[in-house]
Amino acid sequence: MHTEPHSADLIVALTSAGLLPSDGAPWSEHQRWIVDAGTRLATNGLPCGSIVHIAKLAWSLAEREVDTVISEVGKGIPPNEALERQTIRRKAITKLIAAVRHSEVSTAAKTFMHLDGPFQRYRGELLHTPSPLFLMQFEIAAVVEDLRRQARESADPQATTFLGRMLIGLGKHTEAGRWLALSTTNNDDAIGWAHLAITHAFSGHPSDAHDAIGAALQRTENSALVLAFAAVVRAVEAGQASDLAQSASLASESLEFLSKSRDQPFGSDLLEELEARLARGRISLLMPSDFGVHKDGIADLRKVLTRSREGLEGVPAGISELFRLHAHYFLGLNLDDHSEAIEHLQQVIVLDPACAFAENAYRRIGQLEQTP
């Protein structure tokens, strides 16, 4: 880029204002823009102090612009569209303000275009599998074998779907997928399709998960559970997308499904409510805090703790404890209050001391106890 001779006074003023590096580091492109635009203003008689004042105002405007873009994406507007709107607004102002805006808003762009980061971690995140000790305590193995027998003998799609849902909770996603595929063949049920989508997502088959959740959404768009699971599927897809723009778009869809799920009332099925709240809480805590859904995610997980104590009719013993274990675990990893976080992590250890979640909880407690 061609640069004109710069006023030493202007450079000193911009450096003192923090708009240029003070350590002698090379100027970035946007910083050269600021100096070039400022030089032209100085050539036309504008004092250095005024130029710096304009630049600071521009920086403040840029910060407001970032808030606007984040707010738009948080309301479900796709990141690419939000950034395009920002570009149109930026072109309507002077080059100086545009230069400063470019610096600040590019940070927001990186945030959106790297939304795949937390979803990549989610994709590879440890899934809870109850320890043999937990299974023995609640005699779950015998109960599940009885459910398998009922599903084989009756060929009842509802019994088959129920077995699949129980197997998901036990971390047996491959077997759960086989039973749920059978149940959706025999019964065109949105809940069965939604659970099948989850098994595909957690088994590393995003295309099959996408198709299955699409089938569930075709059958109902007013189920809090189906919409919550759609958010999970989109999050997993975002983590596996090779293109950053596609990842950001999928993350935005996940956010939109979360919002729609929270607009739907829960019926009388407590199991569905707990599944939906647990899924929503976990996905909400993956989102950047600027999107404003962390609080809702925390609320969902707290509700899991209270509602799971009300008793699940017709559900094997130990399932309520699995819901509480997950809620305690994710609250413990995400709460800012270290004392409360430690209490939740301790409950994970109490509920299933021999599982991998408990091992992580021990490690996290140690970190929190060493942090002021």
Image (cartoon, rainbow, N blue to C red):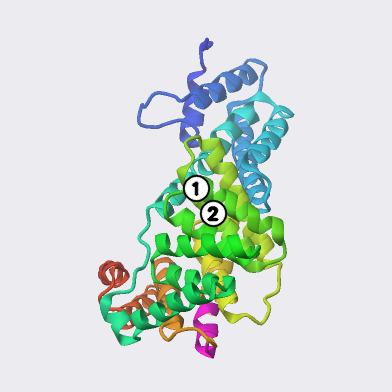
Looking at the image, the residue that sits furthest to the right is 92
Percent across and percent down for residue 320 are 46, 82
Q: What is the quadrant of the C terminus in the image?
A: bottom left
Seen at 32% across and 80% down, the residue is 135
* Quarter where residue 338 is shown: bottom left
Q: How many marks?
A: 2
* Mark number displayed over residue 95: none
Amino acid type at image mark 1 = Pro
Q: Taking 175 as reference, is 238 above or below it?
A: above
Please name the amino acid that badge 2 sits on. Val
Residue found 35% across the figure and 31% down from its top: 23
Residue beneath the point at 52% across and 63% down: 180
Q: Residues within 10 Å of mark 1 (few under 14, many from 20)?
A: many
Q: Position of residue 369 (x, y in %)?
A: 27, 72
Which of these two is toward me, 165 or 292?
165
Q: Which of 320/154 is in front?
A: 154
Tell me the element at label 1: helix
> Residues in magenta?
303-311
| Alpha carbons under labels 1 and 2: distance apart | 8 Å
Image x and y of residue 271, in percent: 56, 78
With 201 as the anchor, is 338 left or right in this view?
Answer: left
User: In this orientation, does residue 85 appear?
Assistant: yes
Say if residue 104 shows up in the picture.
Answer: no
Q: Residue under circle 2?
A: 233
Q: Name the disc covering residue 206, or none.
A: 1
Helix, strand or loop under label 2: helix
The prevailing secondary structure element of the residues shown in magenta is helix
Q: Of the two numbered discs 1 and 2 on the same chain, state the one appearing first in sequence.
A: 1
Image-quadrant location for residue 66:
top right
Q: Nearer the viewer, residue 326 or 104?
A: 326
